[in-house]
Amino acid sequence: MDAGPFTDTWESLADYEVPDWFRDAKFGIFIHWGAYSVPAFGNEWYPRNMYKAGTKEHAHHREVYGDHTEVGYKDFLPRFTMEQFDPAGMAQLFRRAGAQFLVPVAEHHDGLAMYDEPRTRWDVTKVGPGRDVLGEVLGACDDQWITRGASSHRAEHWFFFHPGRSFPSDVRDDADFADLYGPAMPQATGPSEAYLEDWLLRTVRIIDHYRPQVLWFDWWIEHPAFEPYRRMLAAYYYNRAAQWGRGVVIQYKWDAFEPGTAVLDVERGGMADVQERPWQNDTSVSRTSWGWIEGHEWKSDVDLVGELVDVVAKNGCLLLNIGPKPDGTIPPEEVALLEQLGAWLELNGEAVYGTRPWRVAGEGPTSVPEGSFTDAASLGWTSSDLRFTQRTEVGQTALYAIGVERPEDGVVRIRALGSASPLAVRHLGDVHLIGHPKRLEVRRTEDALEVVLPSPLPARVEAVPGFAVRVVLPDPAAPAPRTLLNAEGEGEHESGG
């Protein structure tokens, strides 16, 4: 254990503070890449399910590739070539998308390390691409001022290939492939001390060799056997960060870490309301898989904007996944979605980056169920659905009301700012549509602040989903400008002022 401010106790780790850069970032990109993209069937759990009788992957494998003793998962690794992998082009796309940090998978459950890992012969510098894929993409992101991250899904490898032991398959060939498929134990059997130590040392390798400022862990590290190793790892990472002079973030699921010692991640889900602590939603541009498959069910740009603003309004950050093909290219559908989200953020980024949650997350009939795995279908946003963020500067606060769908009558009704609302302040300052230079016509009633959108809308606004309205909330102690609206609705702005 390196010397530093943290020791491997929960009491010491409770002194951790989420860095401001992460609180400001709001949006990062996740990359699921691996040899599971070669069969491109089912999802990224193909390596397990291909050995699991009764699954569609098992049947598909027999039909397409033949007997599991002849063609196993190991045989996909040489075909995972990434010959068109362009890390600089990827990083430029991520910058255009508006991403502030990147979390590529360093190792998934299948045991293929996507980085240079001396502890195994099964890494991408030795098989498949023959390149340090993680190192190359992180280096390219440095050039785009995108913060480094990495994810580890290694914990689940303990049991991942166990179904292959139940019938004749290459998983049983311990003499040649135990170091890829093994231990292949039942999930109910807890990990051994040797396995836990190997997990720890692999993670330390990622920390020391690649210096990520985000370290994301999948769910099985919550197993009780990992508990002392989680504490050791967190103390080591936080002490390393202190030496580097950088703020870092551990992201975890469920109850793997004590509250406040790291950042909670909710998979494909969300929170019902504003959270006191920063958190994260990791989700994908596809509803059906994290890795590349044929026949994805893609989300829309409206879906992605809605997910982003809902998460940010609740003090969260969105980690959005893509899954490259085995040749290393990003599918055109994913490129288009990232470009569309980037265009929205280029226009409306001031309502997202560096903001903080308001008194309430939003209003309207559409709610996000709290918890994981709630993004199986579009939410059906309406023009009455708004999400709020705020930015405080000297003498005033800018409140942002963000909508995913525009009202047909051209009037945005912010009910939280109606004169009878318990949330409303007495005076309101200038009201603008982001992307439109002039003040907007507004009317204040007991029920709502009614904001009249310009007609026609500016082309930049028309080109992306929804809208973002900025309402100035002056400091009550500051002198009130003549243009302020009072609680009775007097002093409305004129259109074009």
Image: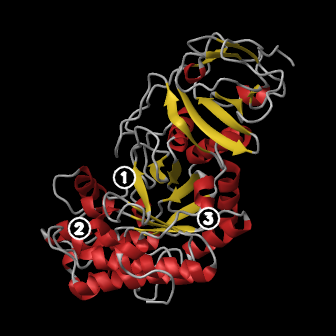
Q: Residue at x 16, y 52 (%)?
A: 54
User: Image height check: is 448 above or below 4?
Assistant: above
Q: Residues within 10 Å of mark 2 (few under 14, many from 20)?
A: some
Give the quadrant of the C terminus: top right
Q: Residues within 10 Å of mark 3 (few under 14, many from 20)?
A: few
Depth check, mark 2 against mark 1: the one in front is: 1
For the residue labelled by badge 2, is the local secondary structure a helix, a strand or a loop?
loop
Residue 143 picture location, percent across and down: 73, 68
Name the foreground residue: 77 vs 339. Answer: 339
Instruction: Name the residue carrying label 2.
Output: 68
User: Image height check: is 12 above or below 324?
Assistant: below
Q: Which of marks 2 and 1 is nearer the N terminus?
A: 1
Q: Which of marks 3 and 2 is nearer the N terminus?
A: 2
For the residue labelled by badge 1, is the local secondary structure a helix, a strand or a loop?
loop
Residue 117 picture location, percent across and down: 46, 84
For the residue labelled by badge 3, is the local secondary structure a helix, a strand or a loop?
loop
Instruction: Name the residue carrying label 1.
Output: 41
Instruction: Name the residue carrying label 3.
Output: 84
Give the quadrant of the N terminus: bottom left
Relative placement, left or right, of 184 versus 417 is: left
Relative placement, left or right, of 350 versus 75 is: right
